[in-house]
Amino acid sequence: MDIELKMLFFFAVTSFIGWIMLFTGIGTRRDVQRRNDRERARTTGTIVDYVRKVRPMGRSTRVSWHPVVEFTADGERCRLEYDGYTDREQFPLGMELEILYDVSDPSHFHLEADPVYTNNGATAIRVAVIWILASAALTLILAVFVGGYRFDLNYTWHKIQRFFSRLRR
């Protein structure tokens, strides 16, 4: 196996996690944008209770707390459980916060202060890009210093042109 294939394989293996994070961040961003487009009406709500949910995870269980929020939507009083889970210390009982909801169905709502909506997948995308670039840099460093690869721009350009000419056939 020549050095280019070894470099490509090493880069693919080391950057795999970065690509997963990138697609996860892009998916989160798309979901948040879709939900924000649907949930445009704004009101103030109050956290009045918490619902404890226990989910089995293999041999252990996962406990999450979902706030029950009370707010007024189009003159009607709503008392609904939030589908996202929150940190009880960050969102204590009685806390007032901004709610964004769907006018046609107020049961579709989210807390404006929810980190999922404020972050919008940006952290995952940033970390993914850094991971992928670091993988590329590490691949080149190992190829040059360990593999003895001499980076020749003309040779590399010739290989790229040859690769794409084979694809056209």
Image: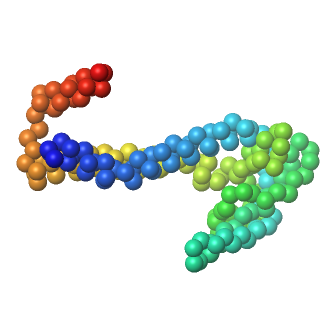
Q: How many marks?
A: 0
Q: Is residue 119 left or right of residue 68?
A: left
Q: Is residue 95 above or below residue 132?
A: below
Q: Is residue 4 above or below residue 81?
A: above
Quadrant, the C terminus = top left
**Which residue is the extreme one toward the right?**
76
Give the residue displayed 45% in from the left and 50% down from the top: 21
Residue extending farthest bottom: 59
Q: x and y percent of residue 132 in the render?
A: 34, 47
Q: Is residue 53 visible?
A: yes
Residue at 30% x, 26% y: name it: 167
Residue beneath the point at 11% across and 51% down: 147
Q: Is residue 157 visible?
A: no
Q: From this view, report whether residue 44 is shown above or below residue 95.
A: above
Front residue of this view, candidates 157 and 37: 157
Nearest to the observer: residue 101 or residue 98: 101
Residue lying at 20% horizontally and 48% vertically, measured from the top left: 6
Quarter-of-image position of residue 41? top right
Q: Residue furthest front?
A: 169
In this view of the protein, which residue sits in the foreground, 97 or 164? 164
**Along the line of sight, the residue nearer the viewer: 21 or 126:** 21
Residue 80: percent from left, percent from top: 82, 57
- Judge from the rendering whether residue 23 lies leftward or rightward of residue 156; answer left or right: right
